[in-house]
Image (cartoon, rainbow, N blue to C red):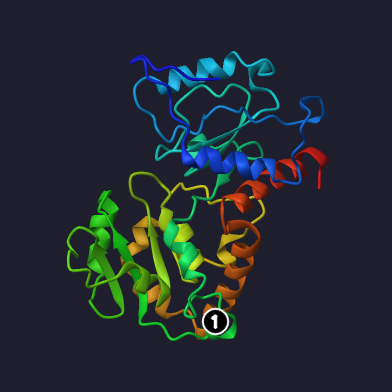
Amino acid sequence: IEVQLINGKTLKTSKYFKALLEAIRSSPFYVENVDDACLLVPNIDHTLVNSEMDAPFRIARALRNLKYWNGGLNHLLFNKHDDPNVQFDTGLAMVAKVGFSWPYYRPNFDISMMPPTGWAAKEWRNKSLCGWAGNEGLNRRNKYLLTFKGRLTSAIRHVAMRLHNGKDIIFAHSRWDYRNKFDYDDMMLHSEFALIIRGNGLYSYRLAEAIAAGAIPVIVADHYVLPFQSFLNWKDFAVLIPEHEMLDIPNILKSISKEQRKILRCNLFKAWKHHLRDITHHVNSALEIVSRRIYGF
């Protein structure tokens, strides 16, 4: 089904949705015959990565015209957008969304998804300093206690600049560091902790990249529904900080012992390996959650 916009153009299929389809079709849950399925995923790009023009209205209409839509009953929709909620009418369908906010999240019905990893993460896994390089990775000597490099896309990121001390805590604005004094890859691979702070939306791609690099995420984003939190206890492998305590982060992190940090990283490795590694694992984890709900496991 092609979704035609008001300007006459056809809504383009995003790379994210193509990767989702590949992951679904390679999943152990996938069946070819629609009559054998108890859950349906529409084969049109409803992720709304590109929300130009009247796309939300056109996507909603295309979904309502699907043969098996039935008001969205027994359907699963995927969404990857900065907004904390879905921009179109989802009916009775479940939503697996990146960056869910609590007011819009329906517990035991919707699923909070992991943001996809960037291209750099694939290269990090091949480096000896990566946190997942066996015992050497677990015992690596880090240059930094805490790092962040990115754009100042939210007021709280502007406040977080006060954490920067130029030594073991680095907060670099990507546009100001034009000489690349603080290389992003180097910081990720040599940081004990990585600051994950909300920007345009509640989530940040830095979450996936930090985990891929073996840096323990320090998540600062009130009302953020953490990915797959129905069966992942994020306190086992991440540090969760309320936004009003952000400036206390240095003291909080320094109070975490070396042994506690190693336990956090070991648990982080398990979560990364089975659930957070790439889009294929993200999709399988989402479908596993739905399967458990259906069959009561």
Q: Quadrant of residue 145?
A: bottom left
Residue to which mark 1 is pinned: 138
Figure quadrant of the N terminus:
top right
Asked whether 266 or 135 is in front, the reply is: 135
Residue at x-position 43% and y-position 36%: 49
Report x, y in % for residue 52.
Answer: 35, 27
Tag 1 secondary structure: helix
Residue at x-position 47% and y-position 24%: 88
Asked whether 150 or 17 is in front, the reply is: 17
Report x, y in % for residue 138.
Answer: 54, 82
Residue 290 appearing in the image: yes
- Residue 129 is left or right of residue 36, and the answer is left
Q: Quadrant of residue 149?
A: bottom left
- Residue 8 is left or right of residue 76, and the answer is left
Q: Tell me: residue 164, above or below residue 233.
A: below
Residue 240 appearing in the image: no
Report x, y in % for residue 140.
Answer: 48, 85
